[in-house]
Image (cartoon, grey):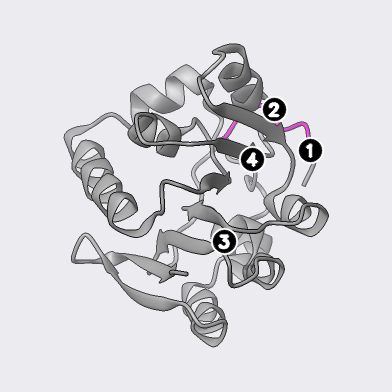
Amino acid sequence: MENDLKLYKGLSFEEYNQRYSSDVHKRQNECLKQELLDHLDFDKKIIDLGCGTGLAYFMLKDRIKEYIGVDICSDYISTLSSMNLEKASFVCMDGLEYVKNNEIKHSNVLFLWSIEYIGTEAIDYIDDTNTIVIVSYNKPYLPGSGSIYEGKEKEFKKLHNPKKVQRDLKSKGLTLRKFMNEDYYFIATRKT
């Protein structure tokens, strides 16, 4: 994937936030916020791999000591960077490349609906001094039109195999369970 992708699912930063502001998504976000409050150590920085439009930052901004948002979508990163958000910095880079090239110690590392893009290999570069929270899909899905995988559905299906992702995460010592008491999502955690 290129490092200069402009849009996610073909949507601009504003369009993405507008599309995902339904009541269902608001309930999902409230559940996610509570999970993050329950699992994160707010004395540590937060590294949000695949940060998208900065959802985790905006949910937790009052508790954050330091936040680093990492995403390959240059439109989102430039928009977030231009907001001059307090205690936040943003990096336009693939999440796997970020963990390979940066020593990550004593941090909270988030993969919110991004592990299938970044890959479970990223966990191998995150040592046991870090708390990890992953939320992802429990069932296969196909990306919508305009996504970075449009026309590459075969590649995406190979990449996005929820059962394999879950096996990999369990083998790496993460605890898995349903997220929002639904079969559609799961949450995986490793707490220090």
Which residue is the site of mark 2? 74
In the depicted structure, whether residue 79 falls above or below residue 181: above
Which residue is the site of mark 3? 116
Q: Mark 2 vs mark 3: which is more N-terminal? A: 2
Name the spot of residue 3 as percent of width and height, x first.
79, 38
In the depicted structure, whether residue 112 falls above or below residue 8: below
Q: How far apart are marks 2 and 1 (CA)?
A: 8 Å
In the depicted structure, whether residue 40 falls above or below residue 129: above
4 vs 1, front mark? 4
Q: Residues within 10 Å of mark 2 (few under 14, many from 20)?
A: some
Q: Mark 2 vs mark 1: which is more N-terminal? A: 1
Which residue is the site of mark 1? 3
Magenta-drawn stretch contains 15: no
Q: Which residue is drawn at the image coordinates 53% and 39% (left, top)?
A: 145
Residue 64 visible within the image: yes
Discs 2, 1 touching: Cβ within 8 Å: yes
Q: What element carries label 2?
A: helix
Which residue is the site of mark 4? 70
The residue range painted magenta reads: 3-8
Q: How far apart are marks 2 and 3 (CA)?
A: 19 Å
Q: Distance between the residues labelled 4 and 1?
A: 11 Å
Name the spot of residue 176 as percent of width and height, x first.
37, 76
Horizontal placement of 83 versus 1: left or right?
left
